[in-house]
């Protein structure tokens, strides 16, 4: 066998390690990720998939039909057919601080993932300098000028870098779906807050109408007192009723102001800044065709589920990173440079300096650190798996709750419509009888209270149908998959 110089042995060893790393490139420490299967349930609630709701003979009382395997549109709020609402959501998307924060988090995750890929490539560093020294036996100092380039490479033989990159890519995916979840929450909050504002405006208007009627009745009661037709207690009771109705207005007006403040903040404005749009129930249309995704598709559509799945994938990759840390680590280094005591001698053949080296390190004892780190990574994966299962269950719960709410909302609106009409007719009759002296004042008070309660409850029932419709769109994922322009690419403030 021919004699190999030390330099040739180093070259052969380096070549062998490079070939080995190429052959082992398909191997990566730790388990490969397998996504959990889609749930096998065929409905969201125990009563199966709903078909349609009942109808009510009043505003917002139409039938809502559920389209099985329907697809949620990206701009689902346009189904309310309110231009001011759509304009408000456009402003919120451009002005929301929470959306800007989620966008920045995504960029952070993207750049972190891109940076992690640098581990696949050799690192190259350059240096230049001069060293001036003097020994005890020398008469003058010696100056050595040098410049060099050094290359260092750690072959990813056991896949530590690949698993690390996989983890960062999964974190980027999670950040992307967290942005989608923020977008869905923002748009949903704008819609439900606008509906709440509309409901409060209607309640305030109805309360003022009731108050006007009660004041009119108070004037008639006072005239009856002057004529000796009723007792003083009747006047006092009606005054108490008027005062009670007036006392309910400040709370409603406060709630309306808070809704307006909330809308301003959702748009990225201060509460003192004006939100031009104002909403009423009559300005909103009840969506009557509701797309209903199959249960098996829900895990693909919900942004929070997709974010949890990406977090699970990242946790799985971290198990591989921890496993690879317990295996041998290979490093290859090489350098080339020049060094001379005279600047004029730099870059001549006799001043060249080069070196090649290969290294192998194997952790032997670190006080149990690596083993416990791996166990911690496995526990983190188990937690992420449990979190994922819980988020899936809660997502199905959200849809089931929204579907049941829509069914019962329609039934409640039908009942409240009948109650309001009966209370209104009863109040008109009792008022007429009281003015004619046919019934006592307690009957009038009871009729007034019943009508006021029925009127407010009717308005609340109408608003509930609108709000719970928005809740269904949110629970189904909001239709982000149908959006032509990704939210991350849409303009910021």
Image (tube, rainbow, N blue to C red):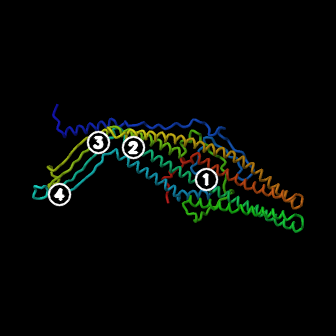
- Alpha carbon of mark 4 to alpha carbon of mark 3: how far? 32 Å
Q: Earlier in the sequence, mark 4 or mark 1?
A: 1
- The answer to whether marks 4 and 1 mark residues whose Cβ atoms lie closer than 8 Å is no
| Residue that label 3 marks | 331
What distance separates the C-alpha of mark 1 from that of mark 2? 43 Å
- The residue pinned by badge 2 equals 164
Q: Nearer the viewer, mark 4 or mark 3?
A: 4
Direction top: furthest residue: 1
Crowd tier of the residue under label 3, counting other residues whose Cα lies within 10 Å: few below 14, some 14–19, many 20 or above: some
* Residue 246: % across, % down: 73, 63
Q: Which mark is residue 471?
A: none
Residue at disc 2, secondary structure: helix
Q: Which mark is residue 132?
A: 4
Question: Which residue sits at x=47%, y=49%?
Answer: 175
Q: Is residue 84 left or right of residue 145?
A: right
Q: Quick one: SS at disc 3?
A: strand
Q: Earlier in the sequence, mark 3 or mark 2?
A: 2
Nearest to N terminus: mark 4 or mark 3: 4
Comparing labels 4 and 1, the label whose residue is closer to the camera: 4
Is 374 drawn above or below residue 336 in the view shown? above
- Disc 4 crowd rating (10 Å Cα; few below 14, some 14-19, many 20+) is few
Instruction: Indicate the quadrant where residue 269 lies.
Output: bottom right
* Spatial CA span between label 3 and label 1: 59 Å
Q: In terms of sequence position, does the residue under pointer 2 or pointer 4 come before the other?
A: 4
Q: Which residue lies under the disc numbered 1?
A: 78
The vertical placement of 273 against 36, above or below, is below
């Amino acid at each position: 066998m021919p004699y190999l110089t030390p330099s040739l042995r180093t070259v052969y060893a380096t070549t062998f390690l490079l070939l080995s790393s190429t052959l082992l490139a398909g191997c990566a420490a730790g388990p490969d990720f397998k996504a959990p299967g889609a749930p096998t349930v065929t409905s969201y609630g125990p009563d199966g998939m709903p078909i349609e709701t009942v109808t009510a003979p009043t505003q917002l009382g139409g039938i809502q039909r559920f389209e099985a395997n329907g697809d949620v549109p990206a701009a689902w709020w346009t189904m309310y057919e309110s231009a001011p609402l759509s304009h408000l959501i456009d402003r919120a998307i451009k002005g929301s601080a929470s959306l800007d924060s989620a966008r920045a988090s995504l960029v952070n995750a993207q750049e972190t993932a891109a940076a992690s890929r640098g581990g696949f490539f050799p690192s190259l560093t350059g240096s230049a300098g001069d060293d001036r020294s003097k020994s005890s036996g020398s008469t003058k100092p010696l100056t050595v000028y040098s410049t060099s380039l050094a290359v260092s490479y750690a072959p990813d033989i056991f896949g530590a870098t690949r698993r690390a990159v996989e983890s960062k890519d999964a974190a980027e995916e999670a950040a992307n779906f967290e942005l989608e979840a923020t977008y869905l929450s923002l748009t949903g909050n704008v819609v439900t807050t606008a509906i709440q504002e509309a409901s409060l405006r209607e309640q305030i208007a109805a309360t003022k109408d009731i108050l006007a009627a009660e004041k009119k009745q108070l004037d008639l009661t006072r005239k009856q007192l002057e004529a000796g037709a009723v007792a003083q207690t009747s006047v006092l009771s009606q005054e108490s009723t008027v005062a009670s109705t007036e006392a309910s207005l400040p709370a409603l007006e406060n709630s309306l102001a808070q809704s307006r403040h909330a809308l301003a903040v959702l748009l990225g404005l201060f509460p003192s800044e004006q939100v031009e749009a104002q909403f009423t129930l009559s300005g909103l249309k009840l969506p009557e065709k509701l797309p209903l995704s199959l249960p098996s598709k829900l895990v693909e559509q919900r942004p929070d589920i997709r974010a949890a799945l990406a977090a699970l994938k990242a946790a799985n990759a971290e198990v591989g990173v921890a496993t690879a840390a317990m295996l041998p680590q290979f490093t290859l280094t090489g350098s080339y440079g020049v060094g001379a005591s005279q600047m004029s001698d730099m870059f001549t053949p006799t001043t060249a300096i080069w070196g090649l080296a290969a290294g192998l390190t194997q952790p032997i004892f670190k006080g149990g650190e690596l083993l416990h780190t791996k166990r911690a990574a496995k526990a983190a994966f188990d937690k992420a798996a449990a979190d994922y299962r819980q988020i899936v269950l809660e997502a199905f719960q959200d849809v089931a709750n929204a579907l049941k709410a829509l069914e019962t909302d329609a039934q409640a609106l039908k009942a409240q419509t009948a109650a309001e009409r009966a209370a209104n007719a009863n109040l008109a009759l009792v008022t007429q009888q009281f003015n004619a002296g046919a019934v006592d004042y307690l009957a009038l008070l009871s009729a007034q209270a019943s009508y006021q309660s029925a009127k407010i409850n009717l308005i609340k029932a109408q608003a509930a149908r609108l709000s719970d419709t928005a809740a269904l769109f949110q629970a189904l994922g909001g239709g982000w998959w149908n959006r032509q322009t990704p939210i991350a690419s849409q303009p910021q403030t």
